[in-house]
Amino acid sequence: NRTRHYNVVSIPADGIGPEVVSAAIEVIQKLAQVSKSFTIEFEHILWGTAYYKEHGRYVDENVLEVLRRYDAILFGSVGAPDVPDHISLWGLLLAIRGPLQLYANVRPVRTFPGTVSRLRDTKSGAPEIDWLVVRENTEGEYSGHGGRSHRGQKWEVATEVAIFTYVGIERIMRFAFSAAQARPKKLLTVVTKSNSMRNGMVLWDEVALEVSRDFPDVKWDKMLVDAMTVRMVNFPGSLDTIVGTNLHMDILSDLAAALAGSLGIAPSSNLDPTGKNPSLFEPVHGSAFDITGKGVANPVATIWSAAEMLGWLGEAEAKDTLMKAIENVCTAGVLTADLGGTANTKEVTRAICEELEKLG
Ligand code: NAI
Ligand code: MG
């Protein structure tokens, strides 16, 4: 059994990013040590707001060339109180997602053992949330298409044009159907707003129907995004894999994370399913200014993201071991404040490392 080696670039960036990324690296190195099936090296790149203040841009000019040298990217979060969010987000994260064609943003949402779903005591029984949210990650409402004219006048105009291409929809739909097919329920819900948005969203519906014919064993249905929020809250057990546009899934995945327990555990993968480019793994949450530097951020979202990264790289067994360790630590009640506990970042990280020693 030959040992595999991976080179990963980590971009901790802003806010709590550095705190949670270093927690994840510590855990992954412990996992490599106990599993003995792989070795992994992390190289930090200090792109982010401090870099921006010094160089006038968030990333190096040859950003894509630099990133393509690595097997994967582990990302923290970008955004600072004194820089407008559209500058920081487009400067760093969106300068990577689109150009590297990381078109599938995958967000598993699960209520962990030992943690409490917000829906636990609704009338619909005792639903356990276990969803896979798939977000189109390169076009739609976040294409950056549009502009502003007559600035500063009362008749100023701003447009934000949603771009939907057949190619873009077909590839995310195909990805979502196969993701649904790989899960036990084989159930996919396609989210649109094709009643009031009569062009792009109707194309989504048409492509969904077309692609569905190649997946006869997947049950699928369609939801309008507003009605979807109600279904998520009232009938969480009726959902499994969910696919939708960049904007819709940005919003619904935050809701999903909060319903399942906390934004502090929500992971995401930004995948190039063609494998041509390195994929990027990051927590769903942002810089969390209110807790930055206090050492209390929940590291689980980033650790889980790193577990997804290992799975993507082909280390399925190591990923399962890590997920088991996280679950055991949650069950044991070692939880940060966002999950109702009293542990800090270091304590949760240490507990997961100790659990890995036991499992390994
Ligand atoms: P946020 O996700 O940073 O924080 C929202 C709330 O959740 C805060 O109360 C925060 O303390 C809490 N929270 C987030 N992560 C947590 C964790 N790991 N453990 C415990 N509590 C946690 O969202 P917000 O406040 O809207 O944005 C702050 C900054 O982050 C902005 O500049 C925004 O643009 C940026 N941002 C960046 C993202 C990214 O890099 N992917 C995603 C979302 C926001
Ligand atoms: Mg978001």
Image (spheres, grey):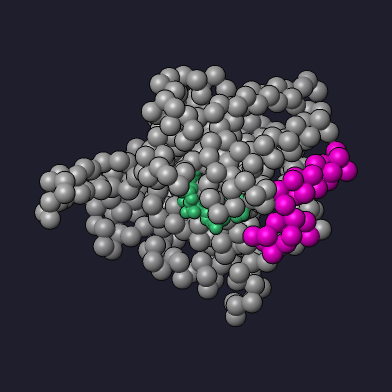
The correct choice, above or below, for 110 with respect to 179 in the image is below
Which picture quadrant has residue 138? top left
Magenta part, dominant SS: helix
132, 298: nearer the viewer: 298
Residue plotted at (79% across, 44% down): 350
User: Where is the N terminus found, in terms of image quarters?
Assistant: top right
- Per the image, is 169 magenta? no
Left or right: 293 in relation to 153: right
**Residue 215 visible from this viewpoint:** no
What is the tally of numbered marks visible in this picture? 0
Give the image location of residue 37, x and y in percent. Answer: 78, 28
Q: Which residues are magenta?
A: 333-360
Q: Quadrant of residue 101?
A: top left
Instruction: Please provide percent x and percent y for residue 44.
Output: 60, 27
Query: Image point 86% across, 40% down: which residue?
Result: 357
Residue at the limit of the structure toward the bottom, as seen here: 123
Q: Quadrant of the C terminus?
A: top right
Q: Residue at x 68, y 24 (%)?
A: 41
Of 283 and 272, which appears nearest the observer?
A: 283
Where's residue 103, x and y in %? 44, 38
